[in-house]
Image: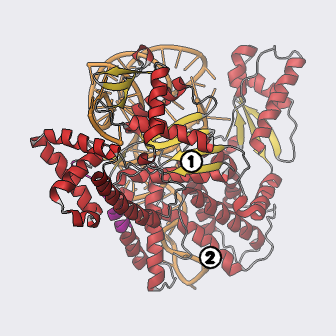
Amino acid sequence: MVKENIAKLVEKAIKTLQKEKVFPEFVIPEVLVEHPDKQNNGDYSVNIALKLAKTVKKNPQEIAEAICAKIKPSKAVEKIEAVSGFINFYLSMEFFQQEISVILRQKDKYGSQQSKKTVVIDYSAPNIAKPFGIGHLRSTIIGQALYNIYQFLGWKCIGDNHLGDWGTQFGKLIYQIKKKIKPKDWKKLSINELEKLYVEFHKEAETYPEMEEEARSYFKKLEKGDKEAKTIWQACVDTSLKEFDRIYKMLGIKIDYALGESFYGGEPMQKIVAELAKKKISAKSQGAIVIKYANDELPPAMILKSDKATTYFLRDLATIKYRLKTWRPDIFVYEIGADQYLHLKQLFSAVKSLGWVKKQKLVHVAHGMIRWEHGKFSTRKGQTIHLEEVLQEAISRAMKIIESAKANIVLSEKEKKEISEIVGIGAIKYNDLSQHHSRDIIFSWEKILSMDGNSGPYLQYTVVRCQSVAKKAKAKKLEVNLTGLNEAEKNILKTIYKFPEIIQLAADNFSPNLICNFAHDLAQKYNLFYNQCPILSSENKETRLALNAAVGQVLKSCLKLLGISIPKKM
RNA sequence: GCUCUCGUGGCUUAAUUGGAUAAAGCAGGGCCCUUCUAAGGCCAAGAUUGGAGGUUCGAGUCCUCCCGAGAGCACCA
């Protein structure tokens, strides 16, 4: 990539200046190559001169000029300029032209890479016996996008859906089901009925606190392999998985594995408990076994309850051990809500104390909560919004827009239905992906269903436009002609080549929203071009068709990485 | 109480990790379809980046204090 070349050129120039004794000896800091905000400051810029001012003891502009003088223009970089301490690089039209032909040649491989690394991504993780709530949407969508991005960069990706299918919550359900439902109806319980039982439990437990103790003992029974408890649990799991599959299908999500918490039981867990005790990482406390952290840096984390039932902390440790052994990943990504910050911090710290990981990175991609203006959704209190409700609403809104659209295309009823699904779901996904994952989202129907402006449908529409033009043109060979490009055309050229670096940046920062920003920017520039410049009737038809095809391709790649489908028409 | 996160036009968000004149969308105002999809485009308006200090060539971004919102803090996960 040009970006790396520029960094190398600058470094080389500084070294030369050191040899010539113009600059004193010092360790050269990392050369950051950025895109300036303003176009008249070039396509790339380097701020190293400003940083070196103190060490070199010259004013930044002088330094920048000295460095500039040592770099010769090349095929790709036609002009280098020192302006108020910045070194600005202007890319040549030849470079832009070449980039377009690379895009047209490589198609959906453009921007992809090879790698030997492996990443395990833990995402989605809905809870058994509860409908798929809107709270799990973020993890599912961001996690899937990260999966796609890393895969695009050549990583071996393993997606693991760490289902919440174990724990005291099942003690609560078993208690309720045994008490209120006849055994012959156990398998017939729907997901909504299970949720209702769960909500009722917490309501009733306010009056009868001893129910909590009962629930714990039922979970304990489940862990010991009690047959009746297991039957009820299995019924809950079966119902839930069927439900989740339906939602995943609607969302177009496929996760490689679904090794829930229940997968990690028995002997491996006992081994971990023993290992923790042997390494003096854990200790007894009030009948339970907890991990204590040096200097009380973190609050203690419980691994076994006083009744010797396991906690999710212990199950998470077992999960890491299994993933290490099975997949040997370089990075563990946990796409989990920010409310689990402390838990994951404790977990990662314990794993390091145990010496299980050395070079491997453990990353918590903490997404903010979807919440009401004051406070979070609570399943226990039944204050949640089911994802399906949101999806259906989005689809019906998309349908309304289709029916009132002003474009002169004719759609069959079947097409309308397909389009409304793709567009409605795309809108919801984009809404989530387009903002930084760390931010909280205040739930609002207006916002989550937004379909104009900076939205999924805007990008989908733009791609469909590109494809429609290409179809009408029936061109075979596409080439960019350098002469006589107008501003709108140049703007596309000066944006589209950034795609590969944006993908890399999105991966490094676990931030799919960077791809959204880029795609929106490119789509905007294309739509301006589209409005200003006739394509098919133009003398510059070839060039314009090449731009049209390149934009269509890159936007398609962006949407694919984000996990957003594209309708054939809209 | 302790710890962490966040605060950017009326609303929802961006800002390449400390860079150049803070960028979009929505809402509201004005314009553009006999021309390739108007779910589009253009123009105008809208900001003391919660407040006060500090660090430096440079701060929305880093540090300190204050204000406001949210989350977490042992037998839920």
- Which quadrant is home to the N terminus of chain A? top right
Q: Quadrant of residue A82?
A: top right
Q: Is residue A254 above or below residue A171?
A: below
Kind of residue at badge 1: Leu
- Distance CA(mark 2)–CA(mark 1): 27 Å
The answer to which of marks 2 and 1 sits earlier in the sequence is 2
Tell me if A540 is positioned left or right of A430 in this view. right
x and y percentages locating residue A238 in the rendered image: 37, 61
Judged from the image, the secondary structure of the residue bearing numbered disc 1 is helix
Can residue A150 be seen here? The reply is no
Which residue is identified by label 1?
Answer: A514
Can residue A429 be seen here? The reply is yes
Tell me if B56 is positioned left or right of B6 in this view. right
x and y percentages locating residue B21 in the rendered image: 55, 37
Residue found 16% across the figure and 42% down from its top: A211
Q: Camera-side residue: A89 or A192?
A: A192
Q: Quadrant of residue B3?
A: top left
Kind of residue at badge 2: Ser
Q: Which residues are magenta?
A: A381-394
Which residue is identified by label 2?
Answer: A468
